[in-house]
Each structure stands twice: as C-alpha cells, then as structure tokens.
Amino acid sequence: MTRVRDRTEDFKDAVRNTAVSLGYNESKLAAILASFIIHKPRQHLPFTKAALTTLESIGTLEQFIIKHRKDYVDLHRTTEQERDSIEHEVLILSEKLHSVTAQFDQLRAIRFQDAINKRMPRRKPNRVANSSSADSSKMNNSELGDTNEIQSEPLRVQQQLLDDETRALQVELSSLLDAAQQTETKMVEMSALNHLMSTHVLQQAQQIELLYEQVRNLSIMVIFAATVILLEFLQCY
C-alpha cells in the first residue's frame, strides 16, 4: 500500500513563489497572512448597535429576575410595595416592546404590499411583447397568405398548420404565465399573513399573561382582605 506524501509545504512554497513573481514583497505577504489570522472588527450599522444594546438590557433584566425570583415569591422577603414596583416597571417595558413590534409589523406589511405591487406590473411588458409578436405574426401570416396564393396548395396548408400551432403555444404560455403570477402573489400574501398571524398570537399570549397576573393579584388582595376581616371578627369575640 502506497503512503500519501504531505505536500503542504510544497504548496506553500509554490504560493509564495507565485506571489513574489506577481510583485508581492515579504511585508505585503506578512500583512496578508496576518489579515487571515487577525480579523478586523466587523462594522455594525447604527440600528444593529442599538439592537445589541437593547439585547444587553433585556439580558440584564432576565438576570435580575432569575436572581430575585425567590425573593419575589416569598412574601417575607419583599413587601407588596416592592413587588408592585417591579411589576409596574416590567409591564411598562412589555408595553413599550409591544408598541415597537407593532410598528415594525406595519412596516413589514407595507414592504410586502410594495413587493406585491412591484411583481404585478413586471409581467405586463411581457404581455405587450407577446401581443406585439402576435400582431407581427398575424401581419406576416397575411403577407405569407398573399404570397402563398401564387404558391402551391400544400405549402399554404402547411403554413396554416404552423400558424395554428404558434397561436396555441402563445395561448398556453400566456395561461401558464398568469398561473405563475397568481401563485407568486399568493405565496407573498401567505408569507405576510403568516407573520401577522404569529405576531397576533404572541400579542394574545401577552395579554392573557397580563390578565392572569391581574387576576392573581386581585385574588391575593381578596384573600388578604378576607383574612383581615376574619381576624377582626375573632378579636371582637
């Protein structure tokens, strides 16, 4: 069994010799090799920087919730005022995020509608070209019909068959083009509706969670009030 020889060093030498023959000196080669090893920091857009900052803030909030979860649940570690303050801040952030995502959904809907509007007239020039080609073919056919009067009968019959096949192909291509356009439009609309539906489901889930928190807080208040009334009643007797 033959052993495979490692030709890595030979390849490096061949690349270096080729680079030197193309005018690259040692400093340029070193700079190119350094660029492969040490990558330049990627330039972020202002929106990307703002999004990363927001993501860091959300991560900090998540760490705070995880750290103080037991304190929040335990009634003896935090007061009702502290819990109400935390809930108030979290609900404000949730409403702000919901408002921003709703605005972004509106922008996406406008973008999808623009994409649909751009795709619709794109097919019209093709139809105009097809109609012009059909008209030119008709003119050519009429001219050929005039010349065929002089020619023999078999040639005229053959030309008529070719014209019929051409018109049938044009009709079939036009119908296929319409079907493709309708399918493409429906796919874009389904994508937009799918995104809007998922956003709507997320909003419904957030509203249900908010209602659950309100009902839970109300039930706690009712139990607390009932306990206070019961204690006062027992003290009277």
Image (cartoon, helix red, strand yellow):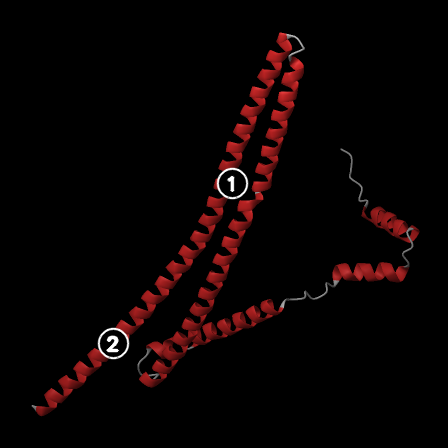
* Residue 3 circle label: none
Estimate the x, y position of residue 208 in percent, counting from the top left: 32, 65
Q: Quadrant of the C terminus?
A: bottom left
Local crowd at mark 1 within 10 Å, few (<14), some, or many (≥20)? some
Please indicate whether residue 236 sits to the left or right of residue 214 in the image: left
Residue at image point 15% right, 85% down: 229
Depicted 187 relative to depicted 82: above or below: above
Residue at image point 57% right, 69% down: 52
Q: Secondary structure at mark 2?
A: helix
Q: Residue furthest bottom?
A: 236
Q: Nearer the viewer, residue 147 or 226?
A: 147
How far apart are the two marked residues, 2 and 1, measured between alpha carbons?
55 Å
Estimate the x, y position of residue 12 in percent, counting from the top left: 84, 50
Q: Nearer the viewer, residue 176 or 209?
A: 176
Which residue type carries mark 2? Leu
Q: Nearer the viewer, mark 2 or mark 1?
A: 1
Estimate the x, y position of residue 84 in percent, counting from the top left: 34, 81
Please indicate whether residue 88 sits to the left or right of residue 46 in the image: left
Depicted 74 relative to depicted 48: above or below: below
Residue at image point 33% right, 70% down: 210
Please indicate whether residue 223 sits to the left or right of residue 28 in the image: left
Q: Which residue is mark 1?
A: 181
Q: Nearer the viewer, residue 167 or 113?
A: 167
Which residue type carries mark 1? Gln
Q: Earlier in the sequence, mark 2 or mark 1?
A: 1
Q: Quadrant of the N terminus?
A: top right
* Residue 218 circle label: 2
Local crowd at mark 2 within 10 Å, few (<14), some, or many (≥20)? few
Please indicate whether residue 143 sits to the left or right of residue 26 in the image: left
Residue at image point 56% right, 28% down: 170
